[in-house]
Every structure is written in C-alpha cells, then in structure tokens.
C-alpha cells in the first residue's frame, strides 16, 4: 500500500470509531457525567467537607485530577475492547487482516478511536468539575501529556483484552476485577502518604498510581511520586503493550479461527 492508501485506511477506521461512540452518546458520555457528579457530591462536598487539606489543597481539589484521569482510563479501554471484540464476533477482523493494510495501521486506528473517546469524556468530566470547584492547571503541557499517554496505554490494554476474549462476558472481566480495583487503589481519593510504610510499598507496584500522581502534578503541582519516574513507568508500559499488540496481530493469535 502507498502512504496515501495507508492514510485513507487509518482515517476510515478512526472516523468509524468516533462515529460509533458518538451515535450512542447516551451510553458513552452521559453515564460518565452522572458518575462524576456523584463522586464530587458525595466524596467532594459531603465527605470532603469533613476532612482537612491534603498537601495544601482541599479534598475536592485534590481528587479532581484522579477523577478526570479515571474517566479517561475507563473510556479509552472500554471503547477499544468493545469495538474490536465486536469486529471479531462479526468476523470483520478477518477481512482487515487479509487486506494489504499494515497491522500497525489497523492497531493505530483502533487506538486513536479509544483515545478520542477518552479525551472527549475526560473533557466533559472536566467541565462538570467546574461546577464543584475551581480548577487548577499548574503545568498544562504535563497534564495533556499524561492524558494522551494514559489514553493510548489503556486503549492498547483494551485491544489485548479484546483479542483474548471469547465472549461478551470476557470483555467485562478485566475491567471489573482488575482495572477498577487498581484505579480506586491508585491514589484517586487519597495520598499514599496516608498509608503505613508496608502499604505504601505495596502501592508502588500499582502502575495507575504513577499516572494519577503525574496528572495531579500537572494540575496541582504536587505528587507522591517523582515525575520523571512516573513518565518512565508510563512510557515503559506503553512500549511493552504496543509491542505485544503488534505481536498478537502478526501471529494472528485469537484472531484467526
């Protein structure tokens, strides 16, 4: 394929993915708005008002970065895993695999679709947060970098889940039993400085902790984790997942019946 043909193939997948989640915005965007509003109402206003400041910020301000990034994570992941598995289930993947389209273009198309949904929902959640608190952006470029890299990473993770899924039930197992616990234990609602030394050391094995703290540094300028270390962890996981996804596509694992 020529570069122009590859670009057309890439654009086709991306546009299709964006139109897909846009058409069902009641299922993809509205739930995030409702859930976020409840988080801010319950944790931010009701419970947060009873708590003191954390690292110089009110509790509601402290949890905003984590809640925004949490919405990016779940939506980027959910978009790719549901969409790509749907293509597997309907046997559309075989048609794409036998086409001259490179696997990198196929993967990039689905990943960008997941990133688009993550950023759209994250932006809506950010707007909702403005009704509950005054937003801070100490380092806007760091904030944007964390959002984009995290969205790419979890889009790739959703792709892996979709490849190995054998039923629609399988695409909900990882988000329910792995992704959600890691996210909630990743420092969204607390600082690991509140934990005992033992649990602080355990928390350091949670990769989402590094993403949440990098996001918090970008918005508030405070973090429990060194920023350089956080970015190294994010990029390391991103490279590993990207390489693994390409390996799965090249080998046809879970894709060729």
Image (cartoon, helix red, strand yellow):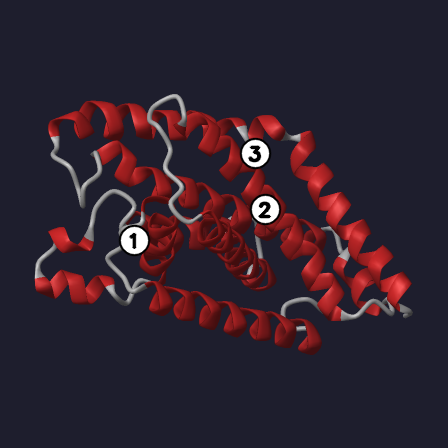
Q: Mark 2 points at which residue?
A: 79
The numbered mark at residue 186 is 1
Q: Name the residue under label 3.
A: 28
The numbered mark at residue 171 is none
- CB atoms at circles 3 and 2 under 8 Å apart? yes
Q: Is residue 48 left or right of residue 2?
A: left
Q: Is residue 103 left or right of residue 28?
A: right
Q: Which residue lies furthest to the front in this view?
A: 138
Residue drawn 34% across the image and 37% down it? 64
Q: In this view, does 76 lie to the left or right of 186?
A: right
Residue drawn 38% across the image and 56% down it? 211
Between circles 1 and 3, the one closer to the viewer is: 1
Percent position of residue 36, x then y? 39, 30
Percent position of residue 142, x then y? 45, 54
On screen, 89 above or below 54? below
| Label 3 packing within 10 angstroms: few (<14), some (14-19), many (20+) | many
As measured in the structure, the alpha-carbon distance from the residue carrying label 3 to the one carrying label 2 is 9 Å
Which badge, 1 or 2, comes first in the chain's sequence?
Answer: 2
For mark 3, give the secondary structure: helix
- CB atoms at circles 1 and 3 under 8 Å apart? no
As measured in the structure, the alpha-carbon distance from the residue carrying label 1 to the one carrying label 3 is 23 Å
């Amino acid at each position: 394929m020529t570069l122009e043909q590859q670009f057309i193939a890439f654009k086709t997948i991306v546009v299709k993915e964006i139109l897909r989640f846009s058409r069902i915005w009641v299922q993809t965007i509205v739930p995030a708005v409702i859930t976020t509003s409840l988080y801010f109402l319950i944790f931010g206003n009701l419970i947060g008002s009873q708590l003191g400041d954390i690292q110089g910020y009110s509790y509601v301000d402290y949890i905003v970065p984590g809640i925004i990034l949490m919405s990016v994570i779940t939506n980027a992941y959910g978009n790719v895993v549901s969409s790509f598995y749907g293509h597997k289930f309907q046997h559309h993947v075989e048609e794409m695999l036998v086409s001259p389209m490179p696997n990198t273009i196929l993967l990039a198309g689905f990943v960008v679709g997941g990133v688009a949904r993550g950023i759209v929902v994250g932006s809506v959640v950010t707007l909702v947060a403005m009704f509950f608190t005054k937003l801070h952006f100490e380092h806007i470029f760091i904030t944007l970098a964390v959002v984009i890299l995290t969205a790419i990473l979890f889009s790739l993770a959703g792709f892996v889940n979709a490849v190995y899924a054998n039923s629609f039930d399988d695409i909900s197992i990882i988000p329910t039993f792995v992704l959600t616990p890691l996210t909630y234990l990743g420092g969204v609602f607390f600082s690991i400085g509140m934990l005992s030394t033992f649990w602080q050391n355990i928390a350091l094995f949670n990769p989402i902790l590094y993403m949440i703290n990098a996001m918090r540094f970008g918005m508030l300028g405070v973090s429990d984790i060194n920023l350089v270390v956080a970015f190294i962890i994010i990029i390391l996981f991103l490279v590993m997942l990207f390489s693994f996804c390409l390996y799965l596509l090249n080998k046809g694992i879970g894709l060729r019946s």
